[in-house]
Image (cartoon, rainbow, N blue to C red):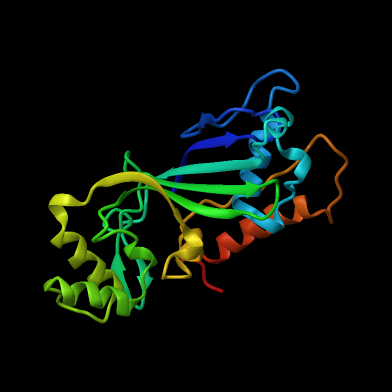
Amino acid sequence: MKIEKVTIKNFRGYKDETTIAIDDLTVFVGKNDMGKSTILEALDIFFNGKNAIAKIEKDDVNAANRMNGECDIILGVTFSDLPLNIVLDDTNETTLSSEYLVNTDGRLEIIKLFPNGGSEKVFFNALHPTNKNCEDLLLKKRPELQKIVKENEIECENRTINAELRKAIWNHFQENLNLQEIYIDANKISEKDLWEKLKNYMPLYALFQSDRKNSDGDSEVQDPMKLAVREILSAPNIVQ
């Protein structure tokens, strides 16, 4: 997957929602204290979580917003070049679009929310069915999906696979899905490891801070090297 744009809100100097187009961008140019480093550190926090060099703290909440009671930091990344197929449950392949996990532009948009600068909460911003008869299917367990199929007499080839059950239900209500762009809580999705699986498709990101004294043993020196070596050794044409 490829980073298309980054969204930042209520993080340090970024008071209002700000979107930065990335695409083929290779360099940020600007005056000092204009927020260049904040963008790079936001990406570090987004991709590397607890292992990030940059850390989110309560003081990172924009001061003006905090005075108005708005204390949630938002960091979002939108991806293009999505994988053709993913495996959500068992060994059954599906797609992000067929699971209604892409936004109105057909992109994967992941939003990380940090309440009061605390622990992250992960959401998909997706164009998703909101018809009460077929909403929140990704949050339902297999017995619940099977119940919907049975009660509505929906044809489904394989009632033992969640993705097939969801597909059958959505197809049944296709004319009245009431698609709306909403936040879907990644931690509540029935396929608990969905977010972990998607991480495997995401770009590797390493932050190196050159404006401070560094040594060879520093994590910000070692981590990028470890990432590079791991990717090289995992290449299919490398004989170990």
Say if 68 sits above or below 49 in the image.
above
Q: Position of residue 83 (x, y in %)?
A: 36, 56
Q: Position of residue 23 (x, y in %)?
A: 46, 34
Depth check: give the residue in front, 70 or 236: 70
Q: Position of residue 182 (x, y in %)?
A: 39, 46
**Residue sitting at the far top:** 31
Q: Position of residue 71 (x, y in %)?
A: 67, 40
Can residue 77 be seen at all in this image of the molecule? yes
Residue at x 83%, y 53% (from the top left corner): 216
Quadrant in the picture for residue 167:
bottom left
Q: Quadrant of the C terminus?
A: bottom right
Can residue 200 be seen at all in this image of the molecule? no
Residue at x 56%, y 60% (from the top left corner): 231
The number of numbered discs placed on residues in the rendered structure image is 0
Say if 172 sits above or below 208 in the image.
below
Quadrant in the picture for residue 84:
bottom left
Q: Is residue 94 left or right of residue 218?
A: left
Residue at x 41%, y 70% (from the top left corner): 190
Say if 232 sits above or below 91 in the image.
above
Depth check: give the residue in front, 115 or 76: 115
Q: Is residue 123 left or right of residue 90?
A: right
Depth check: give the residue in front, 123 or 88: 123
Q: Is residue 100 left or right of residue 121?
A: left
Residue at x 22%, y 72% (from the top left corner): 148
